[in-house]
Image (spheres, helix red, strand yellow):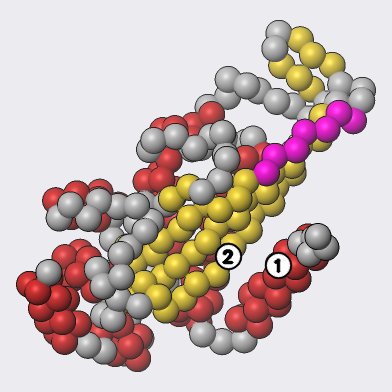
Amino acid sequence: MRSIWWCGLAVIGGLAGLPEAALARGDKPVVAVIQFENQSSAGWWRGGVGWELAGMLSNELSATNAFKVLERDQIRAVLDEQNLAASGRVAPGTGAQIGKLTGAQYLIAGTVTAYEEETASTGGGISFGGVSIGGNSEKAYLAVDLRVINATTGEVDYTRTIEGLAKGGGMSLGLYKGGFGGELANQNKTPAGKAIRAALVEITDYLECAMVKQDRCMNEYDAKEERRREKTRGALDLDE
């Protein structure tokens, strides 16, 4: 325990001011996306989905050209080797240690906390050969609790609940595969898949705003957060 404490202290001392100084010079933040966790009842969640979502978010962040994103396999190998393996849960005090091992300034962790799916018949649809055309309206909702951990201090610098909402209908091809890979392959073009993608894009836009632009764009996200919180409060029944 004492050696772990000393190691963490040394890392914090050696890296003190690194993220802030780098941003002050206009350098891109160096980020690593670790394995997503699931606390929802999503039927599409299976063993490898946590790392798949981490990889998808890494790709979205890279596409902005605003971040330097460490490779998922590199992060996973380091975490496995150090027996810190993954989970979107990072124990207090280990953020700086992981950052030192991986070279990341920030660790990005996500937890899927809610997933809802709704299918309603609209009438007028036809079916043949297992393919349905028309007659259905589908919606999917996804909520992700996002945390950005500062690898210098081990503290959470940014936290936000991000929502993804998607609607679909018309043609449903149950065997269609493409776009997503691995365990999520069969979610391509489904409302669930669209909600996942919507949430990842929203996470990316928020992180670019909060960590790089740091300007009036935050007003939009603060307003979204207030609307989400108000909606949540309105859904609570406090009458006993």
**Overall secondary structure of the magenta section:** strand
Disc 1 on helix, strand or loop?
Answer: helix
Residue 26 coordinates in the image, percent (x, y): 35, 86
Residue 239 coordinates in the image, percent (x, y): 83, 63
Disc 2 on helix, strand or loop?
Answer: strand
* Proximity of marks 1 and 2: CB atoms separated by less than 8 Å: yes
Side of 143 relative to 152 (left or right): right
Q: To which residue does mark 1 refer?
A: 228
Q: Height in image: 95 above or below 76?
A: below
In 3D space, how far apart are the residues under numbered discs 1 and 2 (Cα atoms)? Answer: 9 Å
User: Is tag 1's residue or tag 2's residue first in the polypeptide sequence?
Assistant: 2
| Region rendered in magenta | 116-122
Quarter of the figure with residue 157: bottom left
Q: Height in image: 155 above or below 128?
A: below
Q: To which residue does mark 2 refer?
A: 161
Looking at this view, is 161 or 55 the one in front?
Answer: 161
Looking at this view, is 41 or 26 the one in front?
Answer: 41
How would you rate the neighbour count of disc 1 (Cα within 10 Å): few for under 14, some for 14-19, many for 20 or more?
some
